[in-house]
Amino acid sequence: MNLTLRIWRQQSANAPGKFVNYQVRDVTPEMSFLELLDALNEDLLSKEEPPVAFEHDCQRGTTVCQLSMRFFKDGDSLTLEPWRARAFPVVRDLIVDRSAFDRIIQAGGFISAPTGSAPDANAILVPKEAADTAFDAAACIGCGACVAACPNAAAMLFTSAKITHLNSLPQGQSQRDQRTLSMVVAMANEHFGSCTNHGECEAVCPKEIPLEFIGRINRDLIRALWHRHREPLVISGVVRQPFHEHAGAEEERS
């Protein structure tokens, strides 16, 4: 079959870009989408034209490396463009800089766990529900589809998946509050938009990460802020415990 590809071409982040139409012929149903782009680039190179720069793309429940041409029919026209978000500047053509995701992950810090010889498999018991939740959250591949689909270019689904992955496990409890605060602040510093519950992120996620995780990150954020509020106040070497609402008047004055 023959397909028409309408592809965004942009030489660099500062160069102007535009859509260019290409015809790809003799496409077989067994080809993946990435193989389709490879076939196009081979044709462009044979004509001494610059190839299309690309990484990957995603659609609901499927990464493009798993998307075959049998989902399309002869004569279809497909539009390909880079993720559109302030936090994802275009590098070239379909490639964007997603290093903002890396910085959010780095802000999560580390887990305090003993090192040395490998512990027994059953040394740390993990409840079944917690293990399932962490496993589902770890499925996030950080592709950025959630950000591109969100009208606000929010990264809440990605950040919530990364936080939920570690905060659900016993090993992640010691840094739970600090991890949540640090990653949320890092997300805000990268100029992602705010979440307004459109749900477009869940609709396009190739790993079908649920909106439930955004609820979890909001609860963890409230928990972390509350614990920080209840920490002892340190002033000039004097530790003052937070006043308890049920304490007597005498204790309050003291």
Image (tube, grey):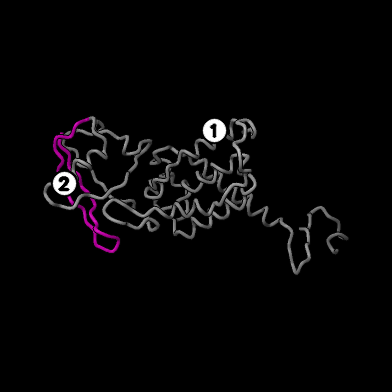
In front of the other: 10 or 198: 10
Q: Position of residue 167 (x, y in %)?
A: 58, 43
Considering only vertical position in the picture, is 13 above or below 114?
below
Chain part drawn in magenta: 1-29
Q: Is residue 10 magenta?
A: yes
Q: Position of residue 158 (x, y in %)?
A: 46, 47
Amino acid type of the residue tagged 2 in the rendering: Tyr
- In the structure shown, which secondary structural element does the residue marked by tag 1 occupy? helix
Q: Which residue is mark 2?
A: 22
Location of residue 75 by image quarter:
top left
Q: Few, some or many C-alpha atoms within 10 Å of disc 2 (few <14, some 14-19, many ≥20)?
A: some
Amino acid type of the residue tagged 1 in the rendering: Asp
For the point 50% across and 36% down, the residue is 136
Q: Which residue is mark 1?
A: 132
Q: Is residue 14 magenta?
A: yes
In screen coordinates, is 150 left or right of 64? right
Location of residue 30 by image quarter:
top left
Whether residues under marks 1 and 2 lie with C-beta atoms below 8 angstroms apart, the answer is no
Q: CA distance from mark 1 to mark 2?
A: 44 Å
For the point 32% across and 44% down, the residue is 56
